[in-house]
Image (cartoon, coloured by chain):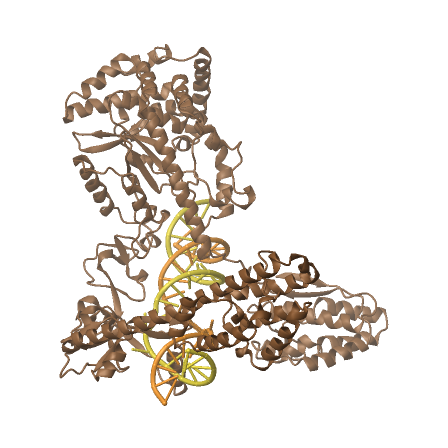
Chain colours: A brown, B yellow, C orange
Amino acid sequence: MTGVLITPVETFIDKGKTKDNFLSLVDNTSINKGKSKEIFQHSDGSKSIFEPIDSFWLRKRKSAIKHNESSDIESLENQEFQDNPVHYINEDNDSDDWEEIDLSTCQDQLDDLSESKPLPNKTIQITFEKPKIQYKARGITKIERAIRQNVHKAHLLALLAHGMIRNKWCNDEMTQAIALSLIEYDLQALFDKALVKVDVKHANILIIALQDLCKWWKNYFVITKPGIRNRAYHEFGENNEGKIAEDDESFSDCLTSINVFRRSISVGEGSRDTSAQLFVAVLRSLGIPARLVCSLQAVSFKLARKNEAYTTRKKDNDLDYKGSTSSSMNDEAQRTLGLGKYKLGAKGKNRSSSKSKREQSDDDDDYSSPSKQSRVDRLRKSCSVLKNSLKKDNSNGLQNSNAPPIFWCEVYFAAYKKWFCIDPVRALVNSPQAMEPASNDMDNVMAYIVAFEQDGYIKDVTRRYASQWGARTRKLRVPVTKDGYDWWHETLSYFARPYERKQDNEEDAHLHKLEVSERMPTSISAFHNHPLYALERHLKKFEIIHPKQPIIGNIRGEPIYPRKNVKQLHTAETWLREGRQVMIGEQPLKHVKSRIYTLAKRRAANMASLYDEEPPESGLYGEWQTEEYIPEPIIDGKVPKNSYGNVNMFKESMCPIGGVHIPINGIGKIAKKFGVDYGDAVVGFDFQARRCVPVIHGIVVAKEHETMLLEAWHEYASHVEAMNDAKREREVLTRWRRLIMGVQIRMRLYNDYVKQDSSDMEEGESEFYHGESEGESELYHGDTEEEDNNYLVNVVNKSGSNKLHETIGEKTIIESNNDKSNTNFSDNMDIEDDFVRIEENDTSTEGSITWDDKDEEMYTEDKNEAINIEGGFIREKE
DNA sequence: CTGAAACAAGTCCCTTTGTCAAAC
DNA sequence: AGTTTGACTTTGGGACTTGTTTCA
């Protein structure tokens, strides 16, 4: 219970203030709290959401009455707790109808209250139930999801590129030469021996050789930096202004060039990732075409749990850093303590066995140590780490130092026809299960494991390492879209080996086998959308398990079925849209409540509910209960239609027997003209604003009419086309005419007035310019001739300082006011004969006839005057 | 104490056959 | 005169996801 203390103002409370206070009380306690209302029974029998005040502060007030005088308090008490608005509201037992507050009554009471006495100087305690904490489950929006997925994809590509570069460096001759120079001769000879022949015996030699090589590498290469780790989305986000600080540990693994890579192997220091990469170089230098394997740590596109991610990481950071810096030591500890659990690493358990000699020689600097300093460092580290690891061992801290890697290698064992994984840092050979990080490991998320081959090709080998591929790992990847588009698959296909190799096919088969033989999940939720297993409880509305055999397991008493027995169901109508019909005699397997989507259906449902009718249910059928839709035949040229007068043509196979679908819109008109029976072909539906509109594409007619209709259609179409062409031609010519006219006007006026009489221009120039800019555009782009003519008229009017054109100007204005269409001042211009002829021929254009007539008339009449018009001049450019 | 399950709350998707008036 | 076009309107349940609480 939460207490809220409301301390009334000490002195008089003015009217407005009181009102506010009470309104806020109403708001806070009743409306906002919504569900968590608690109704208290008062001593007078009334109810309210407030605790009765007979307890604490009523007692207090009674004592106050004793001590002071104040009958005021009593009256106030009555008003405040029996007549106050909150109380009034709660007398209405219908607690849901808060909006039915009669505010006028409230106001009256508030008025009464404020007009009475000042509130007592007391503390009022109102106690009510603590509302449940309302958290906002911030759903990720579609756009945000898309952004995140794109970031994820971009990151994946970057990581792929990173891996490709490092893989290329592993092939660097210099690096391999350095590597070879570091390896003891005996060990090289062992590899040579192992590679002589492909059989189990030699394969076992290779395993031993690899183990020895790992051990040497572990001693040789000191891990001094952390490598790549997974990042939460928000670490790139708002707080960090989109980037990770450059002093961040992640940048420590940033090898700027291959020279740094080479230096790293000669010095024997670097990150754990570099260690694995260099180990691949070492293997390749020995003639083993090892793969560089990387678990791509792309930023997750899922909504990050900020706090959790952050705290987990923070908590782990110290340990992690220690773990990685002291890795070589942990290896020591591992060697003595941890390897026993791995079948192939067991031999390394006892250091004083046959291999002790070689290992001692490591301390004797036989495995070239690049500098004294680093050797001393390493020894010092070994000592301290030995202590650490012993401590850790006692406190069970070994596991952290044993964390699965981001980079490792794979070596192909032809004898076993398998790729064996090798983690050189932990000296593990063929322990794929040890590469999978814990599911709660924030720094290492296993989602995409790619192998970079020596020849540069890339292959996805995730299934070899993910123990819960279907239940977990798959869900961390870019999802395959509903139409089956798999971005990751397509992306990798660009880097895949373009030709098939036997060993690749074998590997694919093996990976597939691993996928389908994945062990069953142990939690119910992991069965949700599992690709192999299904529970009845997770079935969707339109799903069923058929047949209900076999039951392949049980979890908490629930039978587990294979996912392939989960079948999709549809209503009979939906099946029809798929071009299938329910076979006669089949009963629905499941009944579901029909959903109402369209306005029409909603209205029908509302009507039904008025008569208390049951909401309609629809039966669902499986595909095996349906058959291919058998269309009705066309008899005597009569096309069978549905209740809407159409023909369902969702699939071409649904075309009535003896009929043909002519997918041409508008051909129905032709059919109608010929009196041929036809039906509009409905090929689908459009949805807009809750309305369903059939999409009609062409018609269905009897086959015998097809040729005739098509011919008629082509004829009609060509006719329409010709008409359109003619129309277009007319439009084009009109535009040309206007253009040429305009140019001629301009030229003429320019020649007559600008060239010959430029001194006269100055007088009316500014006015002139003002009126023209608009006119110019109209001359070229104007819609009608009329407008063009008006323009000319106006311009002429404005220009008038010349005696000669005065008369013309006035005359024109009068004409334009009386009848615009007859005002064609442009007609005064010279028009080339052939152009005019075009217009004359085109009798369909009314305007041109008028124009031609006018032209003759005016040209002859006003020739001399027209020549002197100033106003027709058109300015070149602003 | 931890992890799974249940629950809550948010977003997205699915849907599957009109009518009327004005303009052309 | 007949045809075409455009405006009108705008649910809600299930799936899915994420976050919190509860419980074994």
Quarter residue A260 falls in: top left
Q: Nearer the viewer, residue A695 or A500?
A: A695
Q: Nearer the viewer, residue A876 or A652?
A: A876
Q: Is residue A412 above or below residue A302?
A: above
Quarter residue A608 falls in: bottom left
Residue A318 rendering spot, x and y as whole percentages:
50, 32
Q: Quadrant of the C terminus of chain A?
A: bottom right
User: Residue A353, can we see it?
Assistant: yes
The residue at 46%/20% (across/down) is A384
- Residue at the limit of the structure toward the right, as seen here: A69
Q: Is residue C15 above or below residue A216?
A: below
Q: Nearer the viewer, residue A405 or A119?
A: A405
Q: Nearer the viewer, residue A10 or A737?
A: A737
Q: How many marks?
A: 0
Residue A584 rendering spot, x and y as whole percentages:
16, 76
Q: Quadrant of the N terminus of chain A?
A: bottom right
Residue A630 rendering spot, x and y as whole percentages:
15, 74
Residue A299 rendering spot, x and y as whole percentages:
43, 43
Q: Is residue A616 above or below residue A747?
A: below
Q: Is residue A562 above or below residue A277?
A: below
Q: Is residue A574 left or right of residue A758?
A: left
User: Residue A354, can we see it?
Assistant: no
Q: Is residue C22 left or right of residue A211?
A: right
